[in-house]
Image: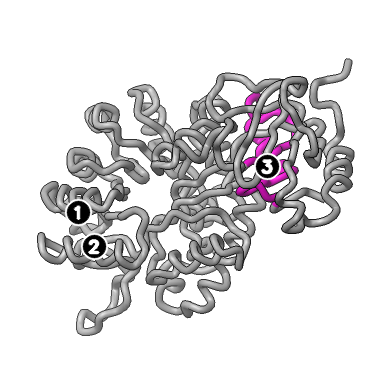
Amino acid sequence: MATPFAPSPRAARAVLAAALLAAPTPAAAQTPLLLRPQQVWDGVADRAQPGWVVLIRGERIAAVGPAAQVDATGARVVDLPGTTLLPGLIENHSHLLLHPYDEARWDDQVLKESLALRVARATVHARRTLDAGFTTVRDLGTEGAGYADVGLRQAVAQGIIPGPRIVTTTRAIVATGSYGPTGFDPAFRVPQGAEEADGVDALTRVVRDQIGRGADWIKVYADYRWGPGGEARPTFTEEELALIVRVAASSGRSVAAHAATAEGMRRAARAGVRTIEHGDGGTAETWALLRDRGVALCPTLAAPEATARYAGWKKGTDPVPARIRAKADGFRAAVAAGVEICLGGDVGVYAHGDDARELELLVEYGLSPVAALRAATSTNAAILGLGERLGRVAPGYLADLIAVGGDPLRAIAAVRDVRLVVQGGLVVRAAP
């Protein structure tokens, strides 16, 4: 008995390649585009709609619905048999200017790799991210590469390089003496992976300066590994964090806080940040605080798994490390408490283009596939303040769309089989 997704991957790709042999010309870009997948998932609903089509005019979605109800007169038709069409995925915790730590230690990337080398590598990361179906990323800190994320954002927006839409945070903010690289003769001052600032005057100046240099968001480290024994401890006071939030908010910007301790999370949430990154030390009380304050959690599940593998852990064979077990338990507790979950994996610790790893872990750790996909689309768009433009398949939204083989609402791994990527109404990738 035939299944709804019967076409083989090879056959489906052949059909798609035939339809898109020529890259869109400027004239073609003005021609309406009709996408005919097996089914459409809109980024919100509990299920996909079989037999629906999507009509694109210019950079926006013009119509969505049953094929018989969409007027596609004059449109270029692209058949996508055996696929699910869904919004372009959004990664909310990326570091385009980092590469996996089994290739080079973080310290070495910050201290030894030139800015030109790091930017050149980042352009490749951007291309791989887009090819993987992630059409937007929030880059959460250049880690010693200054304001290079602003230049990357401009290069993508101007069509100089292919890549996702980039939401920038530039240098990130740390308390003096709390970040790295560390371990050097104290007589020498080495370049840091973020910008140091403390107190009312310095923090106000740094937040405003980063905004003036192109930051879309502000990132702050609410805690870090600077305790007497190298353990994570809070860095800024709640008053300092609240000042950062107020200054950013006066420009219409939000704040993301790195926080891996219960106290760091508590201070950041009470200060008014929009997202907590990592959240490893969350407790029942902190999860309730995040829920009640409307603070989203980017759990970065993939990062500790990656670093454990670099240390020799073989998933599925070796016992699960205590840190990974604690991470999974904390995530499940956050979900049970009703905390808003965003898709953010800390990609850069692991390879760009492998962003789907975080989606798979969200499901492995307890979310349904549809809930994980919402986190990566409509929820992430809303967190970014772009919920009326991105993250949905609906008329008037920007046509950032992907088609994947199979049904990711049943098997999340289907998101790895990317057949088509559309960004701003233009086909930017069609699988051969």
How far across and down, in percent of the image, does residue 393 sit?
59, 32
Q: Badge 3 is on which residue?
A: 416
Quadrant of the rendered image containing residue 103 = bottom right
365 horizontally vs 24: left or right: left
User: Compared to 126, does 267 lie above or below?
Assistant: above
Answer yes or no: do the residues labelled 1 and 2 have beta carbons within 8 Å? yes
Q: In the rendering, which numbered label is found on residue 247?
A: 1
Which callout, 2 or 3, points at the residue further toward the start of the chain? 2
The kind of residue tagged 3 is: Arg
Residue annotated with mark 2: 208
The mark closer to the camera, 2 or 3, is 2
Identify the magenta region.
Answer: 401-427
Which residue corresponds to the image point at 85% horizontal and 53% vertical from the top-left? 21
The picture places residue 15, in percent across and down from the top left corner, at: 88, 41
For badge 1, the amino acid type reads Val
Image point (53%, 77%), residue name: 117
For this rendering, which residue is in front, 59 or 13? Answer: 59
| Real-space Cα separation, disc 1 to disc 2, in angstroms | 7 Å
Report the number of numbered marks: 3
Viewer-side residue, 393 vs 193: 393
Determine the residue located farthest toward the top in the rendered image.
1
State the residue in front, 422 or 379.
Answer: 422
- Quadrant in which the N terminus appears: top right
Camera sees residue 323: no
Residue 278 placement, left or right of 174? right
